[in-house]
Structures are given as structure tokens and as C-alpha cells.
Amino acid sequence: MKKLIFIFVLLGLFSCGDYIDKPKNLVDQTAMAEIIADLMVNDQATFMYQDKNLEAGTRFILKSHNVKPNDFIESFKYYVIKDKMQDIANDAQEILLKKDPKAAQYVKDKLKQNESMQQPLVR
């Protein structure tokens, strides 16, 4: 009887492999990176038009990529839990840097500036 209980406990432990189930309409990682890149550009518009509602821009971006908002949200949660969001964000940054070469130089300058500020003073 003890062996039978032990077997059921082991089966119960190994049957729960994932924290989250794969969404039914999972957005591909490359499409997710493109959407996030477009959302970053849209987010910058909020600084220029602070008193405007830019929700329509977000809806337009999702519609242009043929992605429903719920599918995007579920895919985002899935990739965060699966620890793949960092790679997707890096891909989105690469997409933005390819679209605007001046942005690439700006990012490099900011990284150099931050490195010089973080180095300890040696006397």
C-alpha cells in the first residue's frame, strides 16, 4: 500500500511540468518582436502628445499585425513566464535600430556615457 501511494505521489509531481499552458493563438516570437518595436515607437508619441488618447495607435498596431489584443496579452504572459521575453525585447531593439540608424548612434553614446559614470574614481 505504501508503494502504491508513493507511485501516485511521484506521478502527481511529474505530471505538472509547466506553470502555464501554451496559449491557443500564440503569437510567433518574431511577430511579437515586431509588435513590441512598433509599440515602442507609439509609446514615444505619448511624450509629444501628452494630452491625447493614443489608445487607437495601439489598436492599429495590433490590427496591422493581425493579432487580437487578448492573444497578444496571453502570448506576452506566456513568454514572460517561459523567460523568453528578454530575447524578444532584444530583437525588438534590433528592429528599431535597423529602422533608424541615428538611434543606433544615440544608444551607443548613452551607453558610453553610462559606462563612464559607473567607473569608480581611482586616485
Image: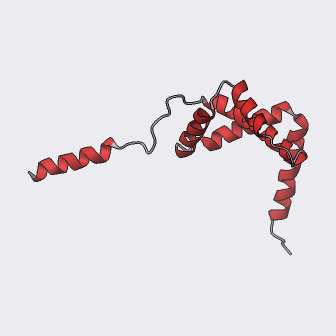
Q: Where is residue 112 drawn, in percent x and y?
A: 85, 53
Give me the residue at 12% from left, 50% from top: 3
Quadrant including the C terminus = bottom right
Residue extending farthest to the bottom is 123
In the image, 91: left or right of 74? right
Q: Is residue 109 above or below residue 120?
A: above
Q: Quadrant of residue 86?
A: top right
Furthest residue toward left: 1
> Is 96 positioned to the left or the right of 14 in the image?
right
Q: In front: 76, or 64?
A: 64
Where's residue 42, x and y in %? 80, 39
Between residue 25 and residue 12, name the one nearer to us: 25
On screen, residue 64 above or below 20? above
- Which quadrant holds residue 104? top right
Q: Which x, y percent locates residue 82?
A: 52, 42
Residue 72 position, x and y percent, is 61, 35
**Residue 94 visible here:** no
- Residue drawn at (87%, 40%), measured in percent from left and top? 103
Q: Residue at x 84, y 31 (%)?
A: 99
Render colour scheme:
secondary structure
- Answer yes or no: is residue 48 visible: yes
| Count of all numbered marks drawn on residues in the image | 0
Nearer-the-camera pick, 41 or 93: 41
Residue under the point 68% across and 34% down? 33
